[in-house]
Amino acid sequence: MLSYMIKSSSYGPFEDHFSREETSEFISERAMTVLSRAAKRNVCKQQLMLMKSSSPWKQMTPRENARSAPERKRFSGKRSLASSAPPMMRQPPQITIEEASVERNEDNDDHIGIEENEISAQDPIYCASAPPTASSLNTTVENVWEARPPMTPRQQTLPQYPNLLTRPKYQPVAKPLHQARPSTTDWDWVRSKLLSRDSVKRPESSMTFDDFLNGLDPDSDEYDTDLEDAYYTEEHEPYDPTGIWHYEKLCKIKGTVPARQVVEKLGNKHIQFRLNHRYIGTKDSEALANGLKNNDFIEDLDLSDNCLSDRGGQHVAKMMRQNRQVYRLDLSSNCLQCDAGRYLAQMLLYNRHLTTLCLKKNKLGDKEALLLAEVLRVNRSLKSLDISHNQLGDNAGEAFSAALMDNKTLRSFNLSWNSLCKRAAAAIARALDINTTLFSLDLSYNGLGDDGAALLGHALRENSTLRFLSLAVNHICGYGAEQLATGVSGGMIMTRKKKKAKMGRTKCGLQYLNLDRNPLGIRGIKLLLQRLSKEKTLKTLSIREVVLNDDLLKQIRTLKTTSSKEITLLHEGQDQVEQTEASLMRGIRVLNTSLESLHVKIIDVVNALDNRGIGANVSDLRNVLAEHTSLTELEIEYAVKSLDINNDDIVQYKDIAIHCRGS
């Protein structure tokens, strides 16, 4: 252990008004290391000041003077920094070693030591970074200069300033550690260490000596390390199965006000979420999608009639790509166009839980239909697709027909209220020859015509799975009606060339046929009535708003009274009460047939759903039937609609009880 007792003297910034202060204290080797770092910064600072004030290039050779021209231009016209330096830097502090003691370790005596004759308690040592004054320069320092090696001729031309920049470099020969001895007169190793490092001007700091030894507080301004990132932690997201926290957070980020109705519906923890008849903008739809993505309860999502744009549909589609809860999605009556169709197609490609998708009353065209058709070829979860009331043409019909040839899961398909014509009908007919999983097909309010109806009639002969077919308002005349009747029940038909052709036994399994508002003609209607009386599977024929003469009306009444099976005929000439009763009886009959496996009837289901005594809600009844019966979405919609006599979305128990008649 080597320790020094030093006596330091320093001047304050006002040497004329304050006396000289003297301090004495013991400093260890560790403290000397710390002081050497502080001394290095002060030495570098003084070197820069002396270099600027002394202008050494005035005594250089012409070549060296020309090399220093940029530096001379840089410092020309500036005030000398040495004249403005504080007094404490003009006269450097004096350090005098008063006592020195050595504590030797007997076990390791060959290591660093010190001899008593090498250190004198009265020899003053001056800081080598500042020029000595006349009063402080003595023989001891001169002896130090004489001990240095001789300078080269080039070095002799330089001004002999006692600073580290102009002194010749001297690197002592490295010695083994056990032979090294500290010297009080040889400071070249200190100068070589200091000159080997860049003189970087460090920012002023309020760090003290104790702070350096003990370390700084991480919260202080002086604490600046690369480890500060370890103290940074992201905001913890609370567990919120309702998604309210995520919805409000994104509303705050987007600068929108959270809707009270949305917050209430998310917090109800119901399986149904219905938000209708509101305007949902782009920012609102993104926040809503963020809340729905983190909701663990919603299974039936209805966002119809909200003016959703393509960006809004994009946010909903991205949410549904990772959603595992929602099985029914309703985006009808919005403003979805080309971009939304692309994102919805991508959603169907990744989602494996969605079973019902409703896209009616939008602005989807043939390009979007092509994208959806490509996805339907590989999708194995979607069971019902409603794309009615759009802008689909024959190209879309062909695309969907090609998809139906490969799809094995779609059971209900609604293409009504579009612009499908003969070419689309031919493609759909080819698909019905191959497809064996489609149960319901709605092609009403298109332009298939007689030729399209004839093609579909031929396809029905080989299809035994289709149960529901709607061809209302398709300009079907007598020829088309005959072809449909023959396809349903077989028998003799009349060709275009007025020749009879015998058709074999049909495999058609059609149960419901809707031909409302078509100019079927007298011959076509008679043939349909004959097939209806003979065919066992066909139970419901709707020819409302079709002109009938007295003979046809008489034939219809005779068929109702003499038929051995329960049939439902909805035709022109019935009053409102008769049509309502016939429609209600048809719905009760269909639903009771589908509930036979559960040993219940539709009247029991309505009674169970009527909790408040005002009737069963249509949406609740639809969900129960979709979950517990094998009926398709189109069959359930027509059956439940027939039970809603007042068109107020309420099914009355008393209406069913009166007309049930033991069914």
Image (cartoon, rainbow, N blue to C red):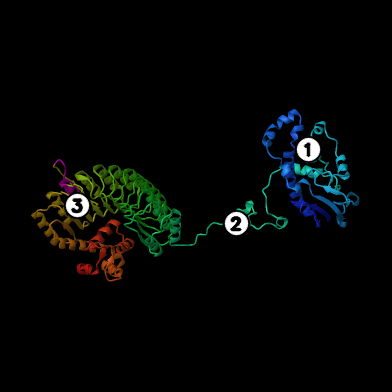
- What residue is pinned by disc 3? 515
Q: CA distance from mark 3 to mark 2?
A: 74 Å
- Image position of 210 (left or right of 282): right
Pick whichever, 154 or 574, lies toward us. 154
Tell how many labels: 3
State the image coordinates of residue 364 (x, y, percent, origin top left): 32, 47
State the image coordinates of residue 646 (x, y, percent, origin top left): 22, 63
Q: Amino acid at mark 2?
A: Tyr
- What residue is pinned by disc 2? 231
Q: Earlier in the sequence, mark 3 or mark 2?
A: 2
Q: CA distance from mark 2 to mark 1?
A: 48 Å
The secondary element bearing badge 3 is classed as: loop
- What residue is pinned by disc 1? 166
- Image position of 219 (left or right of 484): right
- Residue stretch in magenta: 477-497
Mark 1 neighbour density, 10 Å: few (under 14) some (14–19) many (20 or more): some
